[in-house]
Amino acid sequence: MDIRVTDAGRNVKRIQLFVDDEAVSGLYLFDLPMRVGGAVVRMGGIGGVATRKEHRMKGYCRAVMDFTMRYMHDERYDMSVLFGIPNFYYRWGYVTSLVDCECLIRVDGDGCPGALREVRAKHRLRKMRRADIPAVLEIYAKANASRSATIARDPATWRGPRKGSGWQIKARPLVAEQNGKIVGYMFVDESNDSVVCSEAAARDEAAYSSFAAFLARRARALKQETVRVIAPPDDPFAIYLRRFGATFTVRYPLCRAGMACITNFNTLFRKLAAEFTRRARAAGLAQPSSLCVVTDKGAATISFDGRRARVALGERPAQARLCAAQEVLTQMLLGYRGWRDALNDERVRLSGRKAPLGPALFPQGEPFMWPADHF
Ligand SMILES: CC(C)(COP(=O)(O)OP(=O)(O)OC[C@H]1O[C@@H](n2cnc3c(N)ncnc32)[C@H](O)[C@@H]1OP(=O)(O)O)[C@@H](O)C(=O)NCCC(=O)NCCS
C-alpha cells in the first residue's frame, strides 16, 4: 500500500492510495487563494474524495486523508475547505464554517403592486466576452474585498464560472453595460427548468434592476413562478431583492456542506497581522490590548498598540488568554461565529484580564464561497 501525489493540472494535485498498483482511494487537492477578511491565505480545497466500492470500509480513505492533512501542513497550506460527505470530515478537524444561503422570489408577487415582474431594466445585458474579464474581476474583487471564504480570483487564469448553482449545471455569464463600460455582471444557470442566479455584483447599484428584470423575463419565458438567487444574506443584491418579497433560506448545517479547518497554524497567523489591524481599527479600538490564542494546532499572541496589530507565534504574556478548540477558532477567524457566541462553548476558555482586543478581532460575519468557485 502506498500513497502517491501527482500533478492533475494547474494548481491541482491528485492524491491516491494504491494497493498492488491499483488506485483504490483518492482525492483532488486544489491550491487556492482564499480571503480571511481582507487577508489572502493559501487554502487547500479538497474534492472528488472517493474509495472504489469494493474497497470501502477498510480504512483507505482515512489513510488518504491522514496523509493529505500532513501534506497540507508540510507544504504550508494555511487552511483547508471542502464541501462534503455528511458526518465524515469531523475526524480531521473540519467544521462547518461557510454559510449556505439562497433567496426565493415570486415573480408575480401574488398580484401585489411592486412585484418582480414590473421592474424595468436600466441596462442591456449581454454575454460576457473574454475582453470583459478584467472589468468583471475588478467588480468581483471590490464586492468581496473583505468577505471571508471567497476566492481571490486570479486575473491571469480566471476565464469565467466553472459551474452554475449545482455540479452538473453550467452558468451563463452576463454583463451589464453602460456607455461601453461594464457596470455589473451576473451568472445565470443554463437550465430550462428553473431560473437561478448563482452570482451577481455591480459597481453601479442601478444594475440590480437590470438583473432583476432579466430574471423576471426569463421566468416568464420558461413559465416559472419563482426565481432563485444564491447569495449571502448581507450581499447588496440580495438586500435589494427584499423589496419584491423575498424568502431567504440560510442554512448552518451540522457536519456537512462548506467545512473548513486550519492546516498550518503558524503560516496562517503570520499572514493575519494586517487583517487584525484592520479589524481592531474597524471596531474603533484605540487603546493597547493583547490576546494570546491557544489551540491544539498552535499558539499566537496578538498585540495591538493602538495603531497596529502584531502577531508573535507562541504563548507570550498578554492581557487575556483564549484557549479554544481548533474547530471553534476556525469558525471565529472566518466570522461564522462571533466572540460572544464562541465564548459560550464548552470548548473555549477565556482567562486573564478583560481584553477589548478579543471581541474586536472576532466579529461575526457571513463567510461564503460563490458556487462558481466550488471544487
Ligand atoms: C465516503 C468514502 C470516501 C469513505 O471511504 P472509505 O475508504 O470506505 O472510508 P474509511 O474506511 O477510511 O473510513 C474512515 C472512517 O469513516 C467512516 N465512514 C466510512 N464511510 C462513511 C460515510 N459514507 N459516511 C460517514 N462515515 C463514513 C468509517 O466508519 C470510518 O470511521 P472510524 O474509523 O472513525 O470509525 C466512500 O464511502 C466513498 O467513496 N463514498 C462516495 C463518495 C463520493 O460520492 N465522492 C464524490 C464527491 S466528494
Image (cartoon, grey):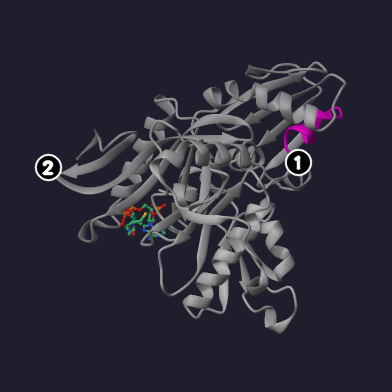
Q: Is 55 on the left or on the right of 226, as rendered?
A: left
In the rendered structure, which amino acid carries the disc numbered 1? Trp
Q: Is 62 on the left or on the right of 24, as rendered?
A: right
Magenta region: which residues?
351-363
Q: Which mark is residue 117?
A: none
**In the image shown, does 299 or 9 lie closer to the viewer?**
9
Q: Residue at x 62, y 42 (%)?
A: 143
**In the image shown, does 273 or 230 lie closer to the viewer?**
230
Q: Residue at x 34, y 33 (%)?
A: 11
Q: Residue at x 55, y 30 (%)?
A: 40
In the rendered image of this protein, does residue 138 appear above or below residue 199? above
In the rendered image of this protein, does residue 271 appear above or below residue 249? above
In the rendered structure, which amino acid carries the disc numbered 2? Asp
Residue that badge 1 annotates: 339
Q: Residue at x 27, y 54 (%)?
A: 51
Secondary structure under the numbered disc 2 in the rendered image: loop
User: In the image as oriented, which residue stretches furthest toward the left?
Assistant: 20
- Give the image quadrant in which the ligand numbered 1 is located: bottom left
In the rendered image of this protein, does residue 85 appear above or below residue 217? above
Q: Quadrant of the N terminus?
A: top left
Secondary structure under the numbered disc 1 in the rendered image: helix
Residue 198 position, x and y percent, is: 51, 57
Residue 125 position, x and y percent, is: 51, 56
Magenta includes 145? no
The answer for how far apart the CA atoms under marks 1 and 2 are is 49 Å
